[in-house]
Image (tube, rainbow, N blue to C red):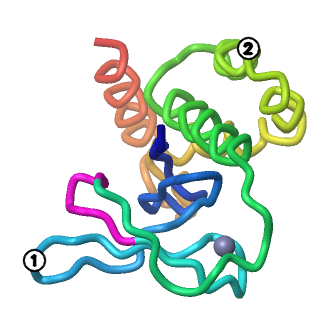
Amino acid sequence: MDQIFRFKTSRGRDAISFNGYSYRLDRRSASGDLFWRCLTNGCRGRLQTDEEMNQPVVRGADHSHPSSIEDGMIRVAYTRMRERAVAETTPIPQIYQEEANRLASLEAASAMLPVLQSIDTALYRARRQCLPPLPDDRDIDILEYLKEVGRIIADRMS
Ligand SMILES: [Zn+2]
């Protein structure tokens, strides 16, 4: 059965994987249909779905590269890692391990998962970015900044 996996690009855009090809959202028609373009640079593969990301219809030219179901699953796992790094206070290595375990039954996919060392910088950055930016003005009240950080952390833990 054809399956659509949803994920986010590293820039946070909606993206999907369908039949082993990954697409990012390109535009939305007036009637609500979604138009997707292949994530591979220069590839002219396109996809159209309804507004719920269902009913995929292949559009555009043939893909210029092979398909990979595993590629889509890695992207989904990585999206979940990034979302959890931001939403939870769980240690990054634990998040990585738990999401990697979900892929473990899919041998090819787990073999492709980047090792933690190569992605943890991005996960830590994602976690840091949900805090207010560090004040770069020396006159700014550091105490007010820390209070704001405390509020955000308290919100997330409640
Ligand atoms: Zn393509």
Q: Which residues are magenta?
A: 48-54
Structural crowding at the residue carrying mark 2, measured as other residues with C-alpha within 10 Å and reported as few (<14), some (14–19) or many (≥20): few
Image x and y of residue 57, in percent: 38, 67
Q: Residue at x 31, y 64 (%)?
A: 49
Ligand 1 within 8 A of label 1's CB?
no
Kindly identify which residue carries mark 1. Answer: 31
Q: Are marks 2 and 1 in contact (CB under 8 Å)?
A: no
Q: Secondary structure at mark 2?
A: loop
**For the residue marked with disc 1, what is the amino acid?**
Ser
Image x and y of residue 83, in percent: 49, 35
Quadrant holding ligand 1? Answer: bottom right
Q: Residue at x 48, y 21 (%)?
A: 88
What is the magenta segment's predominant secondary structure? loop
The quadrant in which residue 123 appears is top right
Classify residue 38 as left or right of residue 36: right
Query: Marks 2 and 1, Cα distance to the nearest angstrom?
Result: 40 Å
Kindly identify which residue carries mark 2. Answer: 105
Image x and y of residue 17, in percent: 54, 52
Image x and y of residue 144, in percent: 37, 40
Mark closer to the chain start, 2 or 1: 1
Q: Secondary structure at mark 1?
A: loop
Structural crowding at the residue carrying mark 1, measured as other residues with C-alpha within 10 Å and reported as few (<14), some (14–19) or many (≥20): few
Does residue 51 show up magenta in the picture?
yes
Q: Is residue 78 above or below residue 47?
A: above
**For the residue marked with disc 2, what is the amino acid?**
Ser
Count of numbered marks: 2
